[in-house]
Amino acid sequence: MQLSGLETGANDYVMKPFNFEILLFKIKNQLKQLESSKIKYKKQVDISPKADEIESVDEKFMRQLSVLIETNVSNADYSVDQLSQDMNISRVSLYKKVLLLTGKSLVEYIRFYRLRKTTQLLEKSQLTVSEIAYEVGFNNPKYFTKYFKQEFNILPSVYIAKKLSKK
């Protein structure tokens, strides 16, 4: 029973009767680990674990999520429902897990990912701002500009100009 629970993704298994102090320490340790994972993924988009490291369940989850978003980044019609199906997890569970690990809702995280991808394209491609907006899955360049400015406190055109002036 204990092994099957852990194999399905449980973080711990408490046997009855249990010691309240041990249970309290286990809860505190889980919360500490969760907080450190949350901090780690809050601003991180690319997840590239080293080959010699053992990958945690949360790292594996975030890597899988990033791969799916990257694969579908230019598809403006790629929905949260489709993403949850591709992740084999319910929409509600996916939403809660992403919020817990990143501090962002699922829609905010996808938008954040797209905007991070945008900065790469703005720096390395010769595409216009509108072309880049469509390339990263925004249907409307005005909304793209609004969210870009909201995230980076700068317009995309000014961002390009600053990057070009540094070269």
Image: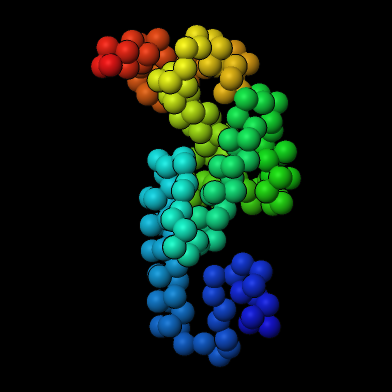
User: Which residue corresponds to the image point at 35% horizontal and 20% vertical from the top-left?
Assistant: 153
User: Which residue corresponds to the image point at 49% horizontal and 32% vertical from the top-left?
Assistant: 112
Percent coordinates x, y for residue 114 in the rendering: 52, 28
Percent coordinates x, y for residue 162 in the rendering: 30, 14
User: Which residue corresponds to the image point at 43% horizontal and 83% vertical from the top-left?
Assistant: 22
On screen, residue 76 above or below 38: above
Percent coordinates x, y for residue 163 in the rendering: 32, 17
Left or right, residue 82 beside residue 112: right
Of residues 63 and 109, which is closer to you in this image?
63
Q: Quadrant of the N terminus?
A: bottom right
Question: Is residue 162 in view from this perspective?
Answer: no
**What colour scheme does the image use?**
rainbow
Q: In which quarter of the image is the C terminus?
A: top left
Question: Is residue 46 in view from this perspective?
Answer: yes
On screen, residue 30 above or below 76: below
Examine the image and state in which quarter residue 123 appears. Answer: top left
Examine the image and state in which quarter residue 6 appears. Answer: bottom right
Of residues 82 and 99, which is closer to you in this image?
82
User: Which residue corresponds to the image point at 45% horizontal and 71% vertical from the top-left?
Assistant: 27
